[in-house]
Amino acid sequence: MPRFRQILDTMAPYRPGKAVAAPDGRSYKLSSNESPYDPLPSVVEAVAEGARQIHRYPDAGSVELTEAVAARYGVPAEHVALGPGSVTVAQQLLEAVGEPGGEVVYAWRSFEAYPLLADLAGVTSVRVPLAGEDHDLDAMAEAVTDRTRLIFVCNPNNPTGTAIRRRELTAFLDRVPEDVLVVLDEAYREYVRDEDVPDGVELYRDRPNVCVLRTFSKAYGLAGLRVGYLIGPEPVATAVRKTTVPFAVNHLAQLAAVASLRAEGELLERVERVVKERTRVREALVGQGWTVPPSEANFVWLRLGERTMDFAAACAAEGVAVRPFHPEGCRVTIADPEANDAFLAAAESFPHRC
Ligand code: PMP
């Protein structure tokens, strides 16, 4: 047998959300925070047209897409770096700054890929417990040591949906030493409606150690094509370009992402519908007697403790796949009204509220 790195002994492969079906065949996948809508015809057309070129390597520099993203945010193209999903860009950042003995600080619970990426990069995870359902930024600032190389701030936080406001976040950034990279993971930014929640793209501009991660997987509906990006100071974007494998972002993903930016108005209308449903679902859950933290993302969070797996099973029996994080709670994606109603019915018939 080959000699694997020791860290692999304690690592489990990433477990994606799965679909389930009720006995009558109904199936609603609310476990991966995907868009519930079919791809836009204009995007499908761009992919179909691009399929004629799949015998060629893609544009390694993703030039057209990089320029389209830069134009969208009013930043120089040198401040944008693409990757096959923002999770890969996060991995590249850890590779770029991680070294043996280095530490990465993040809230817990937060995005479940952070510990995996830290282990892979050979850096030590420093998990700072949430205060209630929110980031504890004071404790995170206090957790920074000489060994800290990177801090993930997931805003809004996956899986709790809570978001950090401007004053707290800027005060935190002011406390972090400039040689520590702060990654504002904004995978769900398009769903934020609280105006006090800052856009990371505003915050990185006068801070050399702050960058933002965004994705086409959620609001833009391209989860299956894998494309995400970093916006940040030029040296950080350059580090991402250096740590990529050649041709990481495929041709179809690049074309679909460019077409999605062109059709952004239509996609953001869909986001608006999800946001409206989020309000409706949360109010209905509260009406049923559940405690639900306010969400600025396309999901809601139910803290279920030891009942987490029972709740997920009760939803599965109704054809509703939710994402259990045992023994903390379940994260449930907001989708179209039919799926949301199926979830609300399952939640209502669950015997113990929280
Ligand atoms: N960050 C957060 C907080 C996420 O929830 C996700 C997806 N679940 C990602 C990053 C990764 O997104 P992708 O790799 O699809 O761009």
Image (cartoon, grey):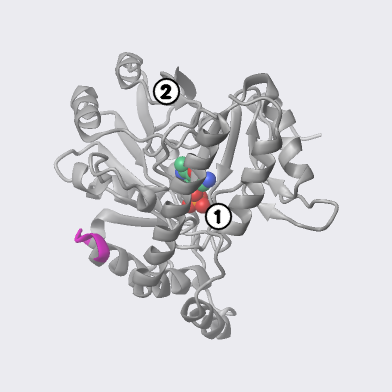
Query: At 42% across and 31% down in the image, what residue appears?
Result: 98
267 sits to left or right of 234:
right
Q: Position of residue 250 (x, y in %)?
A: 52, 67
Task: Identify the secondary structure beneath mark 1.
Answer: loop
Q: Main secondary structure of the magenta part?
A: loop
Precedes in sequence: disc 2 or disc 1? 2
Q: Position of residue 274 (x, y in %)?
A: 46, 55
Residue at mark 1: 335
- Rendered position, 72 above or below 167: below
Residue placed most toward the observer, 275 or 53:
275
Query: At 20% across and 60% down in the image, what residue appears?
Result: 76
Tell me the quarter of the image containing the N terminus: top right
Q: Quadrant of residue 308?
A: top right
Q: Which mark is residue 153?
A: none
Proximity of marks 2 and 1: CB atoms separated by less than 8 Å: no
Q: CA distance from mark 2 to mark 1?
A: 40 Å
Residue placed most toward the observer, 234 or 14:
14
Q: Quadrant of residue 174?
A: top left
- Rendered position, 67 above or below 146: below
Provide the residue span drawn in magenta. Answer: 72-76
As for residue 74 lying within the magenta part, the answer is yes
- Rendered position, 117 above or below 41: above
Residue at mark 2: 102
Q: Position of residue 103 (x, y in %)?
A: 42, 22
As for residue 63 lying within the magenta part, the answer is no
The residue type indicated by label 1 comes to Ala
Instruction: Find the residue positioned furthest to the left.
Output: 206
